[in-house]
Image: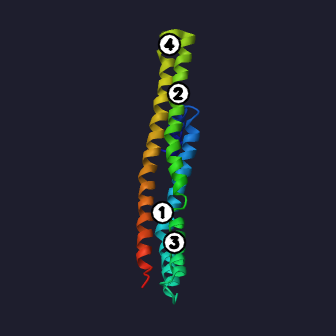
């Protein structure tokens, strides 16, 4: 399918979903940009950071005092904070996607009721437009949320695992 036809189909799909589709696409885009950034950090930057943390701890002569335990906790917490990063924002965007879909559903049903109020039950084509808007926005919101939910849970699990691994690497003996 050539690009102009694909773009035309996409814009038709967006038009079917109504006014809520653009904010939904923007929310999904930001969510995926943050997911990709987190994976970039976890796969490329975190190994170097973890190595540096282990080197800092290994260079300490004192590993058993109360102060050493506080420094160890600080190093682990800092690594976890950097790993977890924008995962909280991603979780919020995952939660916003179905809510935007629900907003589109409500707007589509309002359109259906408006058509029924002005034209009665006889104008099925106009009512179908509102129902279509309601269904499309719900579907897009749910698909966006489900796709993000899987990856945000994987990122959280990875951050928890890495935190435990760093704690184990920073031995106190």
Disc 2, disc 3: CB below 8 Å? no
Q: Earlier in the sequence, mark 1 or mark 4?
A: 1
- Residue wearing tag 3: 45
CA gap, disc 1 to disc 2? 35 Å
Residue 88 coordinates in the image, percent (x, y) = 53, 54
Residue 128 coordinates in the image, percent (x, y) = 47, 21
- The mark found on residue 106 in the picture is 2
CA gap, disc 4 to disc 3? 59 Å
Looking at the image, which residue sits at the far bottom? 61
CA gap, disc 1 to disc 3? 9 Å
26 or 148, which is in the foreground? 148
The residue under the point 53% across, 51% down is 31
- Residue wearing tag 1: 39
Q: Earlier in the sequence, mark 2 or mark 4?
A: 2
Dot 4 crowding, Cα within 10 Å, few <14, some 14–19, many 20+: few
Say if residue 8 shows up in the picture. Answer: no
What secondary structure is found at the residue carrying circle 2? helix
Disc 1, disc 4: CB below 8 Å? no
- Residue wearing tag 4: 123
């Amino acid at each position: 399918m050539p690009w102009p036809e694909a773009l035309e189909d996409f814009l038709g799909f967006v038009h079917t979903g109504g006014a809520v589709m653009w904010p939904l696409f923007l929310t999904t885009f930001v969510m995926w940009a943050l997911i990709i950034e987190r994976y970039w950090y976890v796969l490329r930057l975190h190994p170097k950071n973890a190595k540096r943390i282990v080197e800092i701890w290994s260079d300490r002569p004192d590993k058993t005092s109360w102060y050493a335990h506080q420094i160890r906790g600080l190093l682990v917490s800092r690594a976890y904070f950097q790993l977890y990063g924008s995962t909280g924002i991603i979780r919020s965007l995952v939660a916003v996607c179905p809510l935007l879909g629900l907003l589109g559903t409500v707007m589509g049903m309002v359109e259906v009721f408006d058509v029924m109020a002005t034209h009665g039950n006889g104008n099925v084509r106009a009512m179908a437009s509102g129902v279509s808007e309601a269904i499309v926005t719900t579907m897009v919101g749910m698909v966006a949320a489900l796709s993000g939910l899987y990856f945000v849970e994987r990122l959280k699990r990875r951050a928890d695992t890495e935190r435990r691994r760093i704690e184990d690497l920073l031995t106190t003996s």
